[in-house]
Image (cartoon, rainbow, N blue to C red):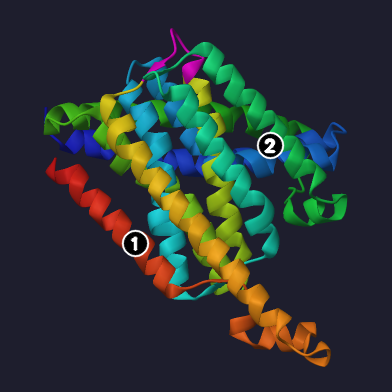
């Protein structure tokens, strides 16, 4: 088979997938509000699914079609790209000021999710029971997101459309159908592309599909940094990676007899993701203690928010050096993928 048709299918599927996922979140949030669903619950689901919705649908459709390597590769590859490309490029663009809650709360949650996922997949598969455990953990994570945000914060973060209830309902159904169709097109094109190139669907999932479904995260993170809101980059990467581990890997495991993992996932891809995550932990921890030491040495009259904000050495930062190291890891990992 010619490469042209699969490539077109992947591109068309990705474009329709991105458009339908973004619109679906908007119209479904609007519809839920019109039916009297609380803003907090809407915010909890939108924040949890957010930009990871394409990964979830693509992996579920891939698993349903028997392309298990593609399903796993999409989830793991998206996380690696989020760390080694999205966060790295944002840090290279501008040293990122870190809110202390990311170091104390969100990052430990991501580490716990990664450790739980590794433990469950250590036998080479993700069974239905493993998936249920991950989904329960995802539900707990959603509850945490809800409780850690006020109604006002959530409402300011959400966007609602000024449309009628009938239109919102019709658009929700239409976008859901388009989402499923575009995912099917993208999965078909990816599988055919793997066959035509003589490579595994895992490799296609780790690279082309993972990069495609991670573009929303990249766009959101870079836009946040350019607007002077670097916390968006961390929220996007940490939140998306947590959801990918607990949700994107879990739902395909509920389909059929579970999800069988290619050996490369445990021997190459999970270790790479673990190394990147460990580097983030080390970098954030070092920054936390170093900055606290500098702040404790200040005189009482110097410990004001204005003076601290004005001195970069007194802020928790994820700098260009850390970004360059993550990017170097990603480049090395990509070289291994394409030369193996």
Residue at (76, 87) in percent of width and height: 306
Q: Is 47 drawn above or below residue 156 in the view shown?
A: above
Q: Is 262 drawn above or below residue 234 in the view shown?
A: above
Whether residue 12 can be seen here: no
For the view shown, which residue lies furthest in the top direction?
A: 257
Q: What type of secondary structure mainly makes up the magenta span?
A: loop
Whether residue 66 can be seen here: yes
Q: Earlier in the sequence, mark 2 or mark 1?
A: 2
Residue at (66, 24) in percent of width and height: 136
- Image position, residue 190 (x, y; %): 28, 32
Query: Could you classify mark 2 by the number of other residues whose Cα lies within 10 Å: few (under 14), some (14-19), or many (20 or more)?
Result: many
Mark 1 lies on a secondary structure that is: helix
* Image disc number at residue 327: 1
- Image position, residue 4 (x, y; %): 17, 38
Residue at (63, 58) in percent of width and height: 103
* Image disc number at residue 141: 2
Left or right: 73, with 104 as reference point: left
- Image position, residue 21 (x, y; %): 54, 39
- The magenta stretch spans residue 43: no
Query: Could you classify mark 1 by the number of other residues whose Cα lies within 10 Å: few (under 14), some (14-19), or many (20 or more)?
Result: many
Magenta-highlighted residues: 253-260
Quadrant location of the N terminus?
top left
- The magenta stretch spans residue 254: yes
Residue at (59, 83) in percent of width and height: 313
Q: Quadrant of residue 227?
A: bottom right
């Amino acid at each position: 088979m010619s490469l042209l048709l699969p490539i077109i299918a992947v591109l068309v599927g990705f474009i329709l997938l991105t458009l339908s996922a973004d619109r679906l979140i908007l119209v479904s949030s609007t519809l839920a509000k019109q039916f009297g669903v609380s803003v907090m619950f809407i915010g909890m689901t939108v924040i949890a699914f957010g930009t990871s919705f394409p990964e979830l649908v693509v992996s579920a459709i891939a698993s349903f079609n028997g392309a298990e390597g593609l399903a796993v590769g999409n989830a793991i590859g998206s996380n690696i790209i989020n760390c080694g490309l999205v966060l790295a490029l944002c840090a290279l663009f501008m040293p990122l000021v870190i809110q202390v809650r990311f170091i104390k709360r969100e990052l430990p949650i991501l580490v716990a999710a990664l450790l739980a996922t590794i433990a469950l997949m250590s036998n080479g598969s993700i069974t239905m029971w493993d998936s249920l455990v991950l989904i329960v953990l995802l539900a707990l994570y959603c509850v945490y997101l809800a409780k850690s945000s006020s109604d006002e914060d959530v409402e300011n973060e959400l966007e609602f459309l000024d449309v009628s209830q009938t239109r919102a309902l019709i658009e929700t159904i239409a976008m859901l159908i388009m989402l499923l169709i575009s995912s099917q097109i993208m999965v078909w094109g990816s599988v055919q592309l793997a066959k035509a190139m003589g490579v595994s669907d895992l490799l296609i999932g780790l690279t082309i599909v993972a990069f495609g479904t991670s573009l929303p995260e990249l766009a959101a993170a870079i836009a946040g940094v350019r607007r002077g809101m670097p916390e968006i980059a961390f929220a996007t990467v940490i939140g998306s990676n947590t959801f990918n581990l607990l949700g994107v890997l879990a739902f395909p495991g509920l389909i059929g007899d579970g999800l069988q993992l290619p050996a490369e996932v445990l021997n190459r891809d999970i270790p790479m993701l673990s190394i990147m995550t460990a580097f983030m932990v080390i970098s954030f921890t070092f920054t936390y203690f170093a900055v606290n030491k500098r702040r404790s040495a200040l005189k009482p009259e110097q410990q004001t928010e204005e003076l601290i904000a004005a001195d970069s050495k007194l802020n928790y930062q994820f700098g260009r050096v850390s970004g360059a190291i993550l990017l170097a890891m990603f480049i090395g990992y990509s070289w291994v993928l394409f030369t193996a």
